[in-house]
Amino acid sequence: MNTMMLLEMAAQAMSERVAVQCDDNRWTMAELFAGAGRVASHLRALGVENAALLDVSSPAVPLSLFGAGWAGLPFVPLNYRLTGDELDALIARITPAVLVTDSERASGLEGRDGLTLISREELLEIARGSTEPAEPDWEMDPEEIAILLFTSGTTGVPKAAVLRHKHMVSYILGSMDFMAADESDAALVSAPPYHVAGMAALLSGIYSGRRMVQLPNFDASAWLGLANKEAITNAFVVPTMLSRIIDELEAGAHMAPTTLRALAYGGGKMPLPVIERAMHHFPTTAFTNAYGLTETSSTIAVLGPDEHREAAGSPDADARKRLGSAGRPLPGVEVEIRDEAGKPVAIGERGEIYVRGEQVSGEYKGRGSLLVEGGWFPTNDGGRLDDEGYLFVEGRIDDVIVRGGENLSPGEIEDVLHEHAEVADCAVVPVPDEQWGEGVGAAIVRARGSDVSAETLQGWVKQHLRSSRVPQLVEFWDELPYNETGKLLRRKVKEALGAPS
């Protein structure tokens, strides 16, 4: 079992289909397969231990990913938005390594011990070379490392999640049918390659036979322009991307692409107003909410298109709330909610989300496995299951507000605030409180044209939750801070609301 197996199958069955394109640079399945073999030969000759990439999306991404898999090296995509010191710290953890990057970055990285640099252009030239493609000879050991993926580090130093070939292949085989796509299908890939969604999009696109159109850097206008130009049928975005796409549509600069049949989203909590607006602007598009983590090789639960339509059209308030859920676990994935002692809780009660399945890694380089008895992975995400198995994700357990010894879930309060028609987005965090130790603070982004007051929103929360949940501090912001993969930078909100005035 090796991720190369997925590309080999696609190259044999769909050799002339375009696998990936970026602008006018197109690679068929057969060309990508042969190129990966040439890249693997080059990597082996270098004698390195890791194959890293520091670059935006381009054909160099799949060539590096599959070339590394062929050569038996872990593929390590790095965040190109890191500062110099942050990047140096990660590079020191993976050398000796080869690093593929653009020419400008390469010149600034020369001279690092144990680091061999290859520019993007050099890699593409190697892959397009005139030498005969290598004969398939990769290892099929499922325990070999396919990808080392550094977590976003929003709560501390990034950890290198270990994703072995068995994890990635299990995810693809469990979520995608081989050659499921029509030849005319095209997926717009705008997630950065250092995010697990970017890796999952590549592997699933290859396996299904869908043409992948790469957008190197996300911009809402460019996304809509490319979607219309390339007759895009499928796409994945994080919530902040979707919000900006809708803003662009409402500004009238672009038309919604009529070819877009399916739009998946994930990577962070989706505000209810945003998905409702999206369903309005894309009335014929099938929406899917995908919840997962780096440590689970991407998606573990989905809210499918039919569930979106049923929830959005239901007169029942509880059924409608499922539009804000992560859906139900994928086949082969088990989910439990547990208390602080690690014991499963009753349906409807809040706790920590535990997950188990073949695609679940739960391992970090240098730290070992975090799996507990029975192979369960504690995600550190808080949540609950309803009586029909729908999973509601409420944010990180570390973000719990401890008010006078009572644990308050920010997600529970945010859910109520999101239900107010004049709230476009919100973040709830702990703030200093002399009497209770911690109190509830809220940063609110008003809906367009709204002048809703703090008192109105405090009264709204009091109508729906106990008084201890009512934000004692409410500030109105123009926007909330998110990283480029859609994760709310809660520590920044906490710092701002907790700072002395």
Image (tube, grey):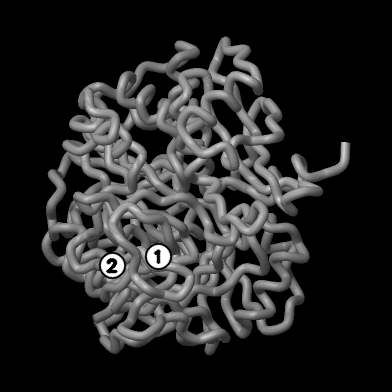
Q: What SS does tag 2 mark?
A: helix
The type of residue carrying mark 1 is: Leu
Q: Which mark is residue 33?
A: 2
Find residue 2 and report its horizontal and vertical position in percent: 28, 78
At label 1, counting other C-alpha atoms closer than 10 Å, the crowd grade (few under 14, some 14-19, many 20 or more) is: many
The foreground one among 403 and 399 is 403
- Which quadrant is home to the C terminus? top right
Task: Please report the residue visible at 48 percent of the width from the left and 27 percent of the height from the top.
Answer: 463
Which image quadrant is residue 39 in? Answer: bottom left
* Residue type (three-letter) at the residue carrying disc 2: Phe
Residue at left offset 66%, top offset 74%: 91
453 above or below 484? Answer: above
Q: Which of 249 and 323 is in front in this view?
A: 323
Could you tell me residue 457's position as x and y percent?
A: 58, 24
Residue at (67%, 65%) from the top-left corner? Answer: 156
- The residue where tag 1 is placed is 63
Q: In which quarter of the image is the N terminus?
A: bottom left
Q: How many labels does the image show?
A: 2
Give x and y (percent) for residue 181. Answer: 15, 48
